[in-house]
Amino acid sequence: MDLENKYKILIQRFILNEADENETDELKQWLNASEANRRAFDAYNSSWSLSVNSKLESKFNVDAGWRQIQQSIKNTEDNKQQSTKRGKRTKLYFWQSAAALLAITLCVSSLYNLKDSLFDQQSQWVTIKVPYGEKTEVELADGTLIWLNSNSQLRYQQNKFGSERRQVFLDGEGYFNVAHGEKPFYVALGEAKIRVYGTLFNVSAYAYQAQIKTTLEKGSIGFIPFEDAEVTRLKPGERLIYTKSNREIQLNSITEKEFSTWHHPVLKFNNTPFVEVVAQLEQWFEIQIQLEEGLHYSQRYTMTIKNETLKEVLDLMKLTTPMKYKIQENKIEIYNHK
């Protein structure tokens, strides 16, 4: 197997979350070997993902695309050598040679801290993806802050955001602190959308889930289940639950204790029993944790979680608890260590 094809396969397996620990380590070593490798990963990640997402995989020549990317890297290196007097280097690279692409997205992977931005020069769509067991914070150009939970994706069109209207597309869970502005702010949730009148709210709208849930903490928002539908306005302290199959809306008042806390900067445990820790981790990382039948531990935990991933937290718990775990897609199974 030639070197290029080997890493193409590794990147594809990583994108699909199929890479095992050894493959991930090997890919990480390759990425750390040079900046050119990291740029190649970003470009191939974007182009390969796009060919799948747009159902053009059969029409998109992967090998030709890879060669174009490698050539564009060479061109970039040549241009950099001729421009050493232009000041500090930029992290924005335009891949003009990939003519088969309809758009190029920015894929964010906190595992490797890859922050290079890849935009199509005309549409400039930005996509931010959060892996399982992780969270991230995003600040938009207008000052809006968005916290994205595990396995969430946020998209917006950078060149039109703020100029025509402020709109983002969410698949997953996000906590929004929307900045005041002259243009209206919308959160598109597939067929449904939220019109934001102000300020703090949480919305959980994973495409694979049967319901959309949004909770208003401060200000006012309007929920629009489909085009031309009547707007349902929420007041602070209200939670709306929308069932997609029958388009039913439930609006309930909630207490302050029922507000989502997963977006808070820290999660603290003080002599907390095992089962309660697991329940809070499920909410914190928005992931299902399944315990082996009959599993019961007497251990209690005192710890503070800040930026740790779920894997790091579980590995820490393993130090004092005879447990094992395995990650399967959006579910984690914990079972007794035998």
Image (cartoon, rainbow, N blue to C red):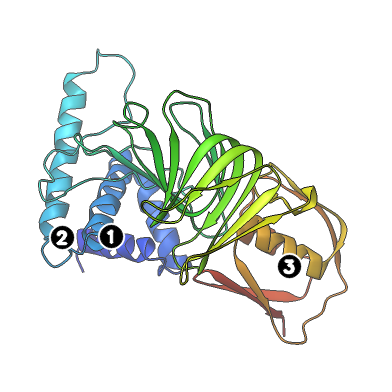
- The answer to which of marks 1 and 3 sits earlier in the sequence is 1
Distance in Å between CA atoms under marks 2 and 1 = 13 Å
Amino acid marked by disc 2: Val
Q: Residue at x 54, y 33 (%)?
A: 178
Residue 212 percent coordinates (x, y): 53, 60
Q: Which residue is label 3 attached to? A: 318
Mark 3 or mark 2, whichever is nearer to me: 2
Amino acid marked by disc 1: Tyr
Residue 27 percent coordinates (x, y): 38, 57
Residue 22 percent coordinates (x, y): 45, 66
Mark 2 or mark 1, whichever is nearer to me: 2
Q: Which residue is label 2 attached to? A: 62
Where, quadrant-wise, is the C terminus in this rendering?
bottom right
Q: Considering the numbered disc 2 on the image, is that residue within a helix, a strand or a loop?
A: helix
- The answer to which of marks 3 and 2 sits earlier in the sequence is 2
* Position above or below: 88 against 136: above
Residue 282 found in image quarter: bottom right
Q: Which residue is label 1 attached to? A: 7
Amino acid marked by disc 3: Lys
Q: Residue at x 67, y 59 (%)?
A: 283
